[in-house]
Image (cartoon, rainbow, N blue to C red):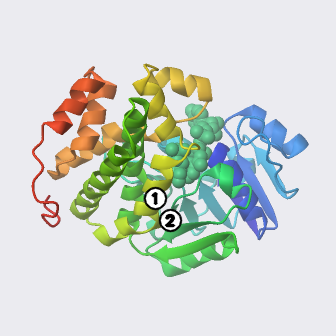
Amino acid sequence: MNITVIGAGSWGTAISGVAAARADRVCVWSFDEDSTKGINERHVNPLYLSDYTLPGNVSASSSYEEALRGADGIIVVVPSPFLRATIKGAAPYILHDVPVLCLTKGIEEGSGKLMSEVVAEEIGNPGRVAALSGPNHAEEICKGSLSAAVIAAEDHDVAEFFRSLLISPEFRIYVTSDMIGIETCAAVKNVIAIVCGVAAGAGYGDNTLALIMTRGLAEISRIVHARGGDPMTCMGLAGMGDLVATCTSPHSRNRSFGVAFAHGESLEDYQRRTHMVVEGAAAARSTAQLARSLGVDAPITFALESSLYQGVELEEALRTLLDRIPTEEFYGLDL
Ligand SMILES: NC(=O)c1ccc[n+]([C@@H]2O[C@H](COP(=O)([O-])OP(=O)(O)OC[C@H]3O[C@@H](n4cnc5c(N)ncnc54)[C@H](O)[C@@H]3O)[C@@H](O)[C@H]2O)c1
Ligand SMILES: O=P(O)(O)OC[C@H](O)CO
């Protein structure tokens, strides 16, 4: 079986290693030529997870045509700001019935579309597109540290195809049909993780982090419900699981950007310094747009959007949050 992984950042590199355990061959499409060269010559991606050696059946290419030739399954894992352009470029080489698994976490700005929807729009045959999410820091997955994820697909056979490709005793894979729930959780938890980082950077304690995570989960579930997903999904791996991992882990780029932002570093400087994409920053804007269009109250997201993009000082954004009068904890889903 031949698997193509589109994207050679941290997660693309780690998932290539996971897929290589079951696949005959894995070919990674990389935007960066240095990654292509490193993987082909030394089985190492010099730009991401550079201390991880990929299995010998993983190769790389910066040509869509070459990377996708003969693919029996495709995994898409480019950061959300580059997803549409990348998949548009790849689309002519993707056959109509090949199953596709989307690992990108985000909501498209402007359209409010989920990542699997963007992929399906560009390649057609939406029933063959699935999404995977969960608490999965690439740094831990590539070391075989015990982890779990959930695959969502409309077509159970597509979910099973990817589950049997990726499952192992160290990587437990569950399945669901709630694509909206899984992908909305995946995008919005990154926003909440930045805010946790900001709070930690500003010197707040664990009580405050628990407050942000809990009210953040309520915010996520309101958006999931309004978007047509199942709020119970928020209790699972893609919801609470990933929220906890991202809001607390030193590996999280979203959390650590929040800390840096509280200390005065800009988004641009952080991303230039780390060569990594802070998905929650893009998601703050796209989630805020989506929440407004759905008529959903999303105060934590709105506060981050205002300080990232509207020049509102962090202290003022925080004051706006704290000026809200706490009411009953549970209003059901209209809260
Ligand atoms: N890193 C993780 O642990 C992890 C875990 C789960 C999910 N994810 C999600 O996976 C997705 C990919 O993240 P990542 O962590 O692998 O990326 P990354 O931040 O580690 O790397 C950035 C990637 O973007 C590529 N890139 C830069 N400019 C580009 C362009 N113009 N067009 C196309 N590609 C370009 C780079 O080559 C590199 O592969 C994100 O949605 C992220 O939220 C990441
Ligand atoms: O490093 P982060 O903050 O982009 O998070 C990575 C994954 O989404 C964790 O599951």
Q: Is residue 334 left or right of residue 210?
A: left
Say which element carries label 2.
strand
Quadrant in which residue 238 is drawn: bottom left
Rendering coords of residue 310 (x, y %): 26, 23
Tell whether label 1 touches label 2 (CB within 8 Å): yes
Q: 8 or 234: which is nearer to us?
A: 234
Location of residue 202 with respect to 188 vertically, above or below: above
Residue 129: numbered disc: 2
Location of residue 257 with respect to 120 vertically, above or below: above
Say which element carries label 1.
helix
Rendering coords of residue 112 (x, y %): 31, 48
Residue 57 appears anywhere in the view: yes
Type of amino acid under label 2:
Val
Residue identifier under label 1: 120
Q: Residue at x 50, y 76 (%)?
A: 175
Type of amino acid under label 1:
Ala
Q: 245 or 134: which is nearer to us?
A: 245
Indicate which disc, 2 or 1, sits on the residue closer to the N terminus: 1
Rendering coords of residue 209 (x, y %): 37, 46
Task: Give the Cα distance between marks 2 and 1.
Answer: 7 Å
Quarter of the N terminus within the rendering: bottom right
Q: Is residue 94 left or right of residue 58?
A: left
